[in-house]
Image (cartoon, rainbow, N blue to C red):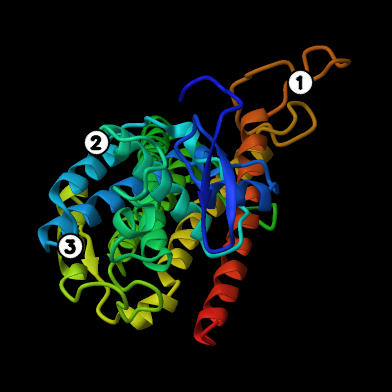
Amino acid sequence: MSETSNKTRLEHDCIGQMEVPANVYWGIHTQRAIGNFPVSGITDSQHPELIRAYATVKRACAIANEELGLIDPAKAEAIRAACLEIEAGKLADQFPVDVMQGGAGTSSNMNMNEVIANRALEIAGRQRGDYTYIHPNDDVNKSQSTNDTYPAACKLALIDAIGPLAESTKKLAKAFHDLADKHINDVTIGRTQLQDAVPMTYGQEFHAFATLLKSDLAAFDRVVPLLAQLNLGATAIGTGICADLRFRKSAIKHLAQITGLPVTAAPDPVAAMTDMGAYVATSAAIKSLAVHLKKAADDLRLLNSGPRCGFNDLNVPARQAGSSIMPAKVNPVIPECVNQCCFTIFGMDVTVNWGLRVKKCVRNRGF
C-alpha cells in the first residue's frame, strides 16, 4: 500500500456518498464498517486463514462465471490474478473490518469484493474506483451472496487451521508414547478420589494420555468432510436467486480442484443455509482436545506437587524460577499455561454454541 496521504476518492452506495482514502484498496462498504464497528480491535486481517480462504472462494467463483460465459474473460483474469495475490499474503493490511460486526459477514464479504476489484482494476491498467469496468458487486460478487460465500470461506479456513493443530497434537501424542515406553516397567500407585487404589506403571499412565489425544485426531478427521460440504451458489437463502442455475455445480467443482479438498455441494441448499452442525462439531472436537489436555496438565501438576510436602511422584522439568521472594522455588508453569488455554477454549465453545443458536433461529424465521 502506498504511503498515507490526505487524498481521497468519492464512492457511493445505496445510502449515499462517502470519501475513501485514495491509497487503499477497500471501498465505501468497508469504510462504513470501519466507522460502525470499532469494537474489539481485532480485525479480519488478523485471521490470515480466513482472508486466504475467502480469496480462494472468490477465485473459484470467477473461474465458474467465466466458464459459464457470465463474465468477460479479461475481467475474470484480472480478478483471478488479484485473488492469487491475496492468497499469497499480499494486501493483508487491506482488511480492517472488526471481527465483531453486524450483518452476518456482509462487511467482510464486501471488503474482500472491494479489495479484489480495485487490485484487479490496477492489474487491468485502470484506476482504483473505476467500477464501470470491474465492479465489486456486479463482477467480483457475481452469482454470489454473503450467505453462501462467507460460510464457505469460514469452513475452508477452519480446515486450514485444523492442520497445524493436528500436527501439534500428533507430536504431543508421540511424546507421551515415547515416555510411556521409557517407563513401562516403573511401578507407581493408581488413585481414585485421590486415595491409594491399585498398582500401575507410569508407562500405562502416559500411554493413556496418548490414547486420548489419538481420539481427538480421529475427531478432526471426521469434521473435515463436514466442513467441506458447502452451500456455494445457493446465494441469499438457499434458493440460488440471482445466480445461473449452472453456477453452483461449476463453482464447487473448481473450488475442489483449487484446494485439493473433498469439497462437495450440500444436498439440500435451503436446509444447509440454516445447518450449523459442522461448526458445532468442529468446536466440540477442539473442546474435547482441551478437556484431554487439561486432564494431562492437572495430573502432571498434582503428581509434581511438593517436593517435600506433596505427592512428588514425578518431576516436571524446571522452566523458570518460581518466585521473586522464595529462593529455589520452581512452579509447573507449562501445565498452568495449558490450563489457561483450555479455559479459553471452553469459553469459546459456549460462545460458538450460543452464536450459532441465535443465527439459526433468525434464519429459520426468515429475517
- The quadrant of the rendering that contains the C terminus is bottom right
Residue position marked by numbered label 1 in the rendering: 322
Residue type (three-letter) at the residue carrying disc 3: Leu
Residue type (three-letter) at the residue carrying disc 1: Gly
Mark in the foreground, 1 or 2: 2
Question: What residue appears at the point 15 percent right and 61 percent down from the top-left corner?
Answer: 253
Front one among 69 and 128: 128
Question: What residue appears at the point 26 percent right and 33 percent down from the top-left corner?
Answer: 123
Residue position marked by numbered label 3 in the rendering: 70
- The image shows residue 347 at horizontal and vertical percentages of 65, 56
Q: How many labels does the image show?
A: 3
Residue type (three-letter) at the residue carrying disc 2: Ala
Question: What residue appears at the point 42 percent right and 68 percent down from the top-left corner?
Answer: 147
Question: What residue appears at the point 83 percent right and 12 percent down from the top-left corner?
Answer: 327
- The image shows residue 13 at horizontal and vertical percentages of 51, 58
Any part of residue 37 in sight: no
Q: How far apart are marks 1 and 2 (CA)?
A: 60 Å
Name which of mark 2 and mark 3 comes first in the sequence: 3
Q: In this view, does 22 lie above or below 153?
A: above
Residue position marked by numbered label 2 in the rendering: 124
Classify residue 118 by image quadrant.
top left
Front one among 160 and 319: 160
Q: Distance between the residues labelled 2 and 3?
A: 19 Å
**Kind of element beneath mark 1:** loop
